Amino acid sequence: MNFNNKLKHWYLQNNRELPWRKTKDPYHIWLSEIMLQQTRVAQGLPYYLRYIEAFPTVFHLAEASEEKVLKLWQGLGYYSRARNLHFTAKYIANELNGEFPGNYKDLLKLKGVGDYTASAIASICFNEAAAVVDGNVYRVLSRYFGIETPINSTKGIKEFKELAQTLIDTKEPGVYNQAIMDFGALHCKPQKPLCDECHISSSCVALEKDLVGTLPIKEKKIKVRKRYFNYLVLKTANGYTMLNERKGKGIWQGLYEFPLVETQKPIESVKELINDKGFEDLFQSDVSISLFNTKDVVHKLSHQHLYTKFWVIEIEKHIKATIKWNEVEEYPVPVLIDKFLTNFKKDKI
């Protein structure tokens, strides 16, 4: 029995029961694959179910407001995925009459769809022999074949894609792709892989050479940038606050946050805060200031760590405070803000 047949045999006995596997509708497959980019299945599943309930077809998603799309995405991270999802839904609904492209090459042209997603949709929905390569596949192939080329290098990306393409089952490419992904997620795991009960262990190079804990290899990560955030949580006497939508191409585009003062180093006192130009531009009258969190909240993103303080600013009124406190939860916000709101609400109960 060859490599792909062994994986398919394992898959038929061990595959995960997932809702998007009960259909070959490209909308459902596309939605699940976009959500599961850099996201574990257990984390992504509830979001998928919420989206399918709110947007049962690509037309429903296309017609939704960006705020609703982002609000339902809240907590899943990498929000550019949600914006690209919305853009592509509108393109498919309005330009393609709701029909997804039926092949890898044309799927790859869709915004937010890369090699992996295009391969998954093409193979599962249209039976095209396009091999998927994700983190699970990299791990299985690097260990089984003993490949030490860094998986995040230009050479590695090309090498693994070419290898994966030579291995794919041309008769059942969708089944094979799902088999190798599940095998990597459930069996050939990053930590504590199940080598003792592995049905392909006899020909696994990493096991033979004691490289299971070493492979796959990644090139060194880029340096993490530290940023210092000071959120000004406005509270007026009549129950209003202020939220701003983040613009531009930085983190959290399209999400809402309290007025932000970003500094080069941590602000340690109220005096430092009120002397900052960002604070002075916003408040010209007397205010009451208190620091909500005694220790910085450290929010870790892929290439930056945010050291955050939430300053509660109480003031009689403010011309820009137009949002009622009981309406704040309706706005899509970053997880950092959402967690603060939960703790702030508890503190006031």
Image (cartoon, rainbow, N blue to C red):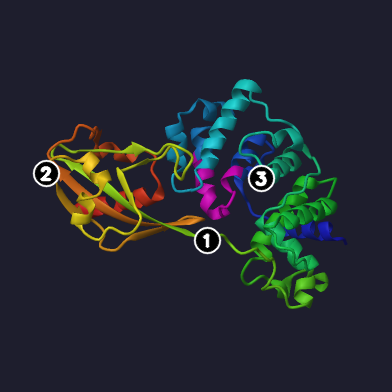
Amino acid tagged 3: Arg
First-in-chain label (1 vs 3): 3
Q: Residue furthest right?
A: 1
First-in-chain label (3 vs 2): 3
Name the residue that disc number 3 marks.
Answer: 21
First-in-chain label (1 vs 2): 1
Magenta stretch holds residue 39: yes
Name the residue that disc number 1 marks.
Answer: 223
Magenta stretch holds residue 66: no
Badges 1 and 2: C-beta atoms under 8 Å apart? Answer: no
The span picked out in magenta is 34-50
Residue 207 lies in quadrant: bottom right
What whole-number distance in Å separates the C-alpha atoms at marks 1 and 2? Answer: 41 Å
Residue 31 is situated, as x and y percent measured from the top left of the image, at 59, 39
Mark linked to residue 186: none
Mark 2 residue crowding within 10 angstroms, few (<14) / some (14–19) / many (20+):
few
Above or below: residue 155 compared with residue 332: below
* Mark 3, secondary structure of its residue: helix
For image coordinates 19% across by 41% down, the residue present is: 283
Nearer mark to the viewer, of 1 and 3? 1
Mark 1 residue crowding within 10 angstroms, few (<14) / some (14–19) / many (20+):
few
Name the residue that disc number 2 marks.
Answer: 286
* Mark 2, secondary structure of its residue: loop
Badges 1 and 3: C-beta atoms under 8 Å apart? Answer: no
Judged left or right of residue 340, residue 115 is right
